Image (cartoon, rainbow, N blue to C red):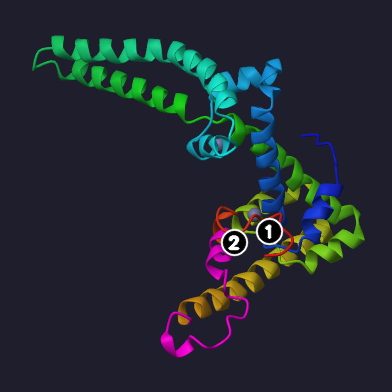
Amino acid sequence: VKYHIDTIPVWDALRLNGECMLCSLRRKQELLSAERYLGGSVMEPDVRIAVNKAGFCQRHQALLYTQSNRLGHALMMHTHLKETHDRLRPLLDKAESAARGKRRVSAGMHRSRSQANSQLQEAARQMEQLINQCALCEGLDTAMGAYTHTLLYMYKTDPDFKRAFECSKGVCLKDASALMMMAEEVLSGNTLSDFVCALSRLTHENLERAEGEVEWFTLKADYRNADKPWGTSRDALERTVNRLRGWCIGAEPNLRDH
Ligand SMILES: [Zn+2]
Ligand SMILES: [Zn+2]
């Protein structure tokens, strides 16, 4: 896969010195996408085709809904609903005919009964696939693939970035696995082993730090510790969840002070 290399956003995300630079990039991209969908980019033919076909997952419906543009949201949902209904028609027909076929078969005809069962299940599976799509998730995955690739490329080609990455707080487990998955595509030899060892060390160190911080968070609930200082544990729950699963709760990852 060929990616356009844009190093500036990756440097910016690293300089935030947050829990995960890829989560910062993902969140920025996600908010930008939500804004673009509601800001008329659905008028672009390829975007419109993608939205009409896939719609949005629950999380992204909720995000779009918070953008205070119910009309823009409704316009997208109207065309997506029509297309979904068209795609649903043959599946519902298939389910109905499977169920009718099942009623016709006599008690002794086990084979065609199980055939009708599997046809019904097949229709149900296709229905599930139909609603398990999200245009925003798909766009986000593509963008994150490009950023993950760029990060590895910068590690290989820019000694300043290599040093800065090795002094950072690393990345969340979701992004650590994505980096590891792609590492051999971009890196080889010593650079590959340097990177994997650095990523592994950063992961250990930061999980250990999170363990200590979240433990102190729980101990602070004890009245005997009420007067003791919080240290860095005030938002330890949020940072622990975000490190384990990728950013999803607490302060926005692109705010400088949290
Ligand atoms: Zn992350
Ligand atoms: Zn989504």
- Mark 1 close to ligand 1, CB under 8 Å: yes
Task: Give coordinates of residue 123: x percent, y percent.
Answer: 35, 20
- What kind of element bears circle 1? loop
Give the magenta part as a residue range: 220-242
Q: Nearer the viewer, residue 134 or 199?
A: 134
Residue 187 visible somewhere in the drawing: no
Asked if residue 98 lies in the magenta stretch, the reply is no
Q: Is residue 123 visible?
A: yes
Indicate yes or no: mark 2 CB to ligand 1 under 8 Å. Answer: yes
Residue occupied by mark 2? 243
Q: Tell me the quadrant of the picture where the N terminus can be found.
A: top right
Residue 132 position, x and y percent, is 47, 31
Quadrant of the rendered image containing residue 50: top right
Going by the numbered disc 2, the residue's amino acid type is Arg
Q: Who's the residue at 64% across and 35% down the image?
A: 34
Q: Is residue 222 magenta?
A: yes
Which of marks 2 and 1 precedes in the sequence?
A: 1
Quarter residue 60 falls in: top right
Pointers 1 and 2 in contact (C-beta within 8 Å): yes
Query: What percent of the width, then of the height, locates residue 66?
Result: 56, 39
Mark 1 crowdedness (10 Å alpha carbons): few <14, some 14-19, many ≥20: many
What is the CA distance from the residue labelled 1 to the residue labelled 2? 7 Å
Residue wearing tag 1: 20
Residue at 38% x, 26% y is 125
Name which quarter of the figure residue 194 lies in: bottom right
